[in-house]
Amino acid sequence: MIGFLVALFSGALMSVQGVFNTQVTKTTGVWVSSGWVQLSAFAVCLILWFATGRDHVAELLEVEPRYMLLGGVLGAGITWTVIVSMSMLGPAKAALLIVVAQVLCAYLIELMGMFGVEKQPINIWKVVGMAFAVLGLVIFENQ
């Protein structure tokens, strides 16, 4: 239940952050806004690292496979794409498209067992759920 609530909170935070970042971009530009997002996130992580116990930074050198360290690069791409999509489509439409794409991609990762995730068998009810999500996009787009 806690995981469910945290996921809901995460989705809400992402939507609010996207709106904030899009508004900042109107004044500063997309790269300044994206850079600020990453820099301020780093500052918060640094403060929390000092406050909550210090995992060893050198352990990053032990991460395998190495491409798993590209999360920050992906984060910069996420920030940029959210800003651009929200400014072009509006928050609701952009968030809906982002979430559906995220779920579809995550399900494909599970089905194929990519990136160290345990491979899952195809589940017809999950496929039906995905179809409903895509149908929701069509309905939302045409209203």
Image: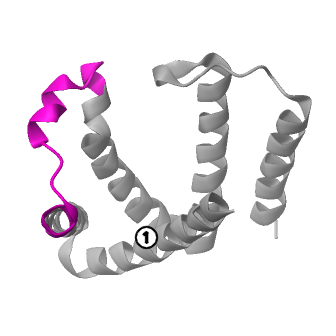
Q: Which residues are magenta?
A: 47-67
Identify the residue shown where x is 85% and y is 41%.
131
Identify the residue shown where x is 32% and y is 49%.
75
Q: Where, quadrant-wise, is the C terminus in this rendering?
A: bottom right
- Look at the numbered disc 1 and give the secondary structure of its residue: helix
Which amino acid, mark 1? Gly
Q: Where, quadrant-wise, is the N terminus in this rendering?
A: bottom right
Identify the residue shown where x is 28% and y is 79%.
24
Q: Give the image quarter of residue 61.
A: top left
Q: Position of residue 77 (x, y in %)?
A: 33, 47
Q: Count how many numbered circles sit on residues in the image.
A: 1
Identify the residue shown where x is 31% and y is 29%.
68
116 and 124: which one is in front? 116
Q: Position of residue 54 (x, y in %)?
A: 15, 54
124 and 143: which one is in front? 124
* Residue hosting label 1: 18
Q: Position of residue 67 (x, y in %)?
A: 28, 24
Is most of the magenta stretch helix, strand or loop? helix
Q: Residue furthest front?
A: 53
Q: Position of residue 125 (x, y in %)?
A: 90, 37
In the image, taking residue 17 as reference, residue 143 lies left or right, namely: right
Note whether 18 is above or below 49 in the view shown.
Answer: below
26 and 99: which one is in front? 99
Q: Is residue 40 magenta?
A: no
In the image, taking residue 31 as reference, residue 127 lies left or right, namely: right
Q: Is residue 53 magenta?
A: yes
